[in-house]
Image: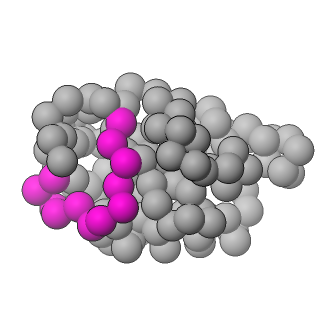
Amino acid sequence: MNLVDAEAHLVKDKLTPAQAKELATECFGDMFKIVVDIERGVLAAGGMLHADAEELLLSDGSSQDDLWGANYLPGRDPGLKLEYTALINIRPALGNRDQEIKSEAVRRKVREVVERLIGPA
């Protein structure tokens, strides 16, 4: 996987810490955007907008209702690396009326996928 650009990348295998750091540096300096498919257990990382990663997952067979956006900050301490905020999270039909994921169950699923494919959240 070439992570030397700001394009979104489908992540099905665990990133190395060096890849996560490189992706953050190339995208926003200290963070990168992610979209997690909480049912398939995969994610897309990178891109300038969460919508870039969302589009990649949709074209790979994900269902819209299973996709949730977040930001990953690899330089932070565990417990502070994951921000559950993205425009794509505004889903009134699913009970989420804010950019931040409000459901603890959805947050838990997002965190589980992130920790399996990127590292401590």
Residue lying at the far top in this picture: please name it.
48
* Total labels drawn: 0
In this rendering, is residue 54 above or below 70?
A: above
Magenta part of the protein: which range? 8-19
Residue 26 in view in this figure: yes
Which residue is rendered at x = 84% and y = 51% of the image?
Answer: 94
Quarter placement of the C terminus: bottom left
> Residue 65 in the image: x percent, y percent?
73, 50
The one of 75 and 34 positioned closer to us in this rendering: 34
At x 45%, y 54%, the residue is 43
Q: Residue at x 38, y 26 (%)?
A: 48
Q: Residue 120 at what x, y percent from top left?
A: 33, 71
Question: Residue 55: where, in percent of width, then height?
Answer: 53, 34
Residue 92 magenta-highlighted? no
* Residue 71 in view of the camera: no
69 in relation to 16, above or below: above
Reply yes or no: does residue 10 show up in magenta: yes
As rendered, which of 85 and 64 lies closer to the eye? 64
101 sits left or right of 8 in the view: right
| Quarter of the view holding residue 75 | bottom left
- Residue at coordinates 37% horizontally, 73% vertically from top-left? 116
**Where is residue 98 shown, x and y percent of the image?**
74, 40
Q: In this rendering, would 68 be left or right of 28?
A: right
Q: Quadrant of residue 106?
A: bottom right
